[in-house]
Image (cartoon, rainbow, N blue to C red):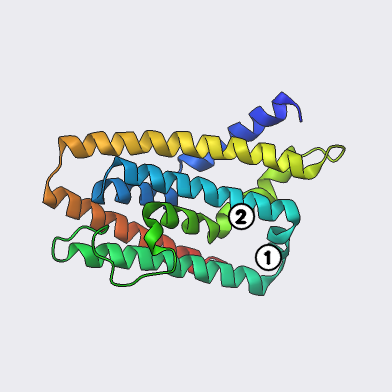
Amino acid sequence: MQWHQLLGFVAAVVPLTLVPGTSFTLVTQQVIAGSRSDGVRAACGSACGLLVHATCAAIGLSALVMSSAEALTVVKLLGGIYLIWLGVTTWRSTRRGVEPTTRRRWRLPWAQLGGFGQGLWSNVLNPKAASVYLTLLPQFLTSSRPIASQIAMLAVVHVAVVLVWLLFWTSVVAAARTTIDTPRFRRGMSRLAGTVLITLGIRTAMAS
């Protein structure tokens, strides 16, 4: 793989990464409700979710899902329901002034993973993340070279771009929280994050 291909891929994924979405919202919520380290864990979980999609693309599973209307619908519904669950629990945990990270009535199997698990599964169940490896990434592959190794290299680049952005944003939110650290501010930001997650969940589940 040539350097110009890597640079071209970076130029393509940077705008997609900077657009606020699920990972951006989760990192914000984790820092506001918990601490900077919680945001870091959510960012790392999101990055690992991308590696799952890269692995699936390398062995052809993603192509199978995206080519099947029924399988794609299931992925969208699961992803949408998961995001709505995160948003609803975030809202519920602020009704009595309790932070989202300390009150969890509804538990999923990966709930004990905290921010890392939320970041991981929000990307694993995100069909848009999968589409990056099926529509964008193939444009930077060379048929004369092993496909799996090329996907691995581009995936590492993608993860690096995402991590740099999310970790930078984590630091920004953590600094803002230090300046404006009041219960009212935390509740307001958590409710905003919950609303965004619910909206993203509905949009994901209803996406055609």
Please provide percent x and percent y for residue 51: 59, 48
Residue furthest out toward the top:
3
Q: Quadrant of the N terminus?
A: top right
Front-most of residues 207 and 58: 58
Dot 1 or dot 2: first in sequence order is: 1
| Picture layout, residue 1 above or below residue 99 | above
Measure the alpha-carbon separation of dots 1 and 2.
9 Å
Q: Is residue 77 left or right of residue 182?
A: right
What SS does tag 2 mark?
helix
Please provide percent x and percent y for residue 127: 57, 59
Please provide percent x and percent y for residue 199: 38, 62
User: How would you rate the neighbour count of disc 2 (Cα within 10 Å): few for under 14, some for 14-19, many for 20 or more?
Assistant: many
User: What mark, if any, has residue 130 been given in the picture?
Assistant: 2
Q: Quadrant of residue 4?
A: top right
**Residue at 17 percent of width and 61 percent of height:** 98
Visible residue check, residue 175: yes
**Residue at 37 percent of width and 68 percent of height:** 85
